Each structure stands twice: as structure tokens, then as C-alpha cells.
Image (cartoon, rainbow, N blue to C red):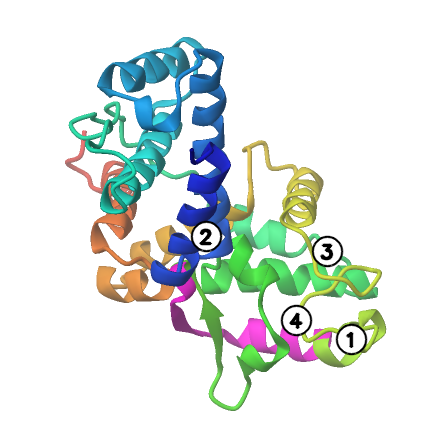
Amino acid sequence: MIWMADYLEDYLQYLILEKNCSNNTVEGYLADIRQFFAFISSFQITTVEVNRDTMQRYIHMLKKKGISAKSIGRKISSLRSFYSFMLREQYVELNPVSGIHSPKMGRLLPHFLTPQEMELLLTMPDTANVLGLRDACILELMYSGGLRVSELINMDVRNVNFDQGFIRVMGKGSKERIVPLGDMAIVLLQKYLYQARSVLDSGLSRSLFLSRRGKLLSRQSIWGMIKKYGKLAGIKKNISPHTLRHSFATHMLENGADLRSVQEMLGHADISTTQIYTHVSKQHIRDVFDKTHPRSK
């Protein structure tokens, strides 16, 4: 008899070796599947005994707990992938997730800062000290490059090309892309590398950004740092690392950038993901029209 853990170990190897999924993607899939395993174990149902009714009961339980439609959709997607693998390996005869639809989600517009708020946030770190200079560099890169927090913390010193003015970014699914560096980002990066990183570096790391102990920065420390500077700037919005990425895309489109270029810089595989920012941009155009055209009212 094969135990749940054995199925999961096989699936893990499939994700890593065949699908070439990133660590974050693998961890997300496994967390969702383990949560489902805990649910079916409480009913003494084995992995291979799961049917469509079991799936419906699980989704009903998630809804009762107040789990968002987006999170439920992700969990269904994880289980669909897992049971597709189980069917392929002939561990099950039917995929119990087949025909199960994700809950309908209202398309939420991303939160972003105004250019004025963004400028204020960028001035908050004290660049006269080592950590402040590092933080200023992080904020500038995340905003001017539209980087994900995972892309930033995994960046290597060798990814920076000052001569040609770009950085190599390793995005989702280990897909590499080239992101241009603005003049301010270049100035701050050079200053950080020569004045701050050399102080933080223990000599053992190639990571671009380091903690005060010379270790790799965590996602949580970046979140905390952005929250801190947002509070110092008096920004009332609930901001996160992704807010800077959203602000990058929104400001680019509002200033005339074409959608395809923004898609490339964000590292979106599908342009439909980038198109959400056009809704924000259209609202900006509407606001400008209402405020400035004599016949708008």
C-alpha cells in the first residue's frame, strides 16, 4: 500500500525534475495538497478514494471558513495538477477535480501609490548610514524595475551590468529577463556596492542585498522595511513590496509606455495579466478629462 507521503514525494520529484517549477511554486503546491490531506484524513478517506463529492465538501468547508475566492481557486488548481499527475501514473482511475470550477472572482484593481507618494517614500531611508543606503537602493530597484520581492532577494552581484545599464532578473519558473536600470538606480547601486555592501559582506555571499549580519535578506524583512518607510512618509495606504511593482506598471502606462513593453519588463507570461493595469490607466485618463476639459461637466 502506498501512503500519502509517498504520493507526495513522487509528485515533488515530478514538479522539480519534469515541470522545472520554482521553489516558491513547489512550496505553494505542497502546502495546498497537505491541507487537503489533513481534511480527507479527518473523514478517514485515502488519497485514491477521493471523488467529486469529496472535492465539493472540501470547497464548501473552505467557503465556510471565509477563505477568499482567489485562495480557493489556487487550492483547486494545485489539486487539479496533483490529481492529473496521479492519473498519469495510474494511481487513480479518474481525476476527481475534473469539472470542478474555481469560484468566480471580481477582478480587483491593484493598489498603487501616486507618483508624489512614491517620490516621498523613496526619500525616507537615511543614505548617510549603511543600512539606510541599502534600503534606498532596494526601494529604487523595486520601483524602477518592477521587481517581485523574491526576484530582489535572490539577485546576485553578477546580475548587474553597469556598462550597458541593465540587471538580469530570474523570474517565475526560472525565466530570465533583462530589466533596464534608471540613472538614479545606477547611482544608488554603485554607491551601495562600494560604500555599504562591502561593510555588510562577510566574504561568503554573492547575494546583492545582505542583512546587517551579512546574510541573505528574507521576504519578511523586506515587507517590514517597506511598511516602516511607508509609515514614516505618512502614507495611509496598506503598502507592500507588490505595491511598488503595481506602481511601476501603472506609472509607465500613464506616461505612454506600450503594454507589450511593460509585459516584458514585468516578466508576465501572458499579456492578459498585464492588461489589468490598463483599467487603472483608463481611470487616470477619465480623471484628467473630468478635471481639465471645459465640457466635461
Q: Nearer the viewer, mark 2 or mark 4?
A: 4
Is 199 one of the magenta-colored residues? no
Name of the residue lying farthest toward the top:
64
Mark 3 residue element: loop
User: On the image, numbered disc 4 is attached to which residue?
Assistant: 208
Give the residue at x 50% y 50%: 24
- Judging depth in this view, the residue of 117 and 182 nearest the camera is 182
Magenta-drawn segment: 173-192
Report which residue position mark 3 lands on: 125
Q: Amino acid at mark 2?
A: Arg
Q: Which mark is residue 178?
A: none
The amino acid sitting under disc 4 is Leu
| Mark 1–mark 2 CB contact (< 8 Å) | no
The CA distance from mark 3 to mark 4 is 18 Å
Residue marked by disc 2 = 245
Q: CA distance from mark 1 to mark 2?
A: 30 Å
Determine the CA span between mark 2 and mark 3.
Answer: 19 Å
Point out the frontmost of discs 2 and 3. Answer: 2
Where is residue 267 drawn, in percent x and y?
A: 35, 62
Q: Is residue 74 above or below residue 210?
A: above
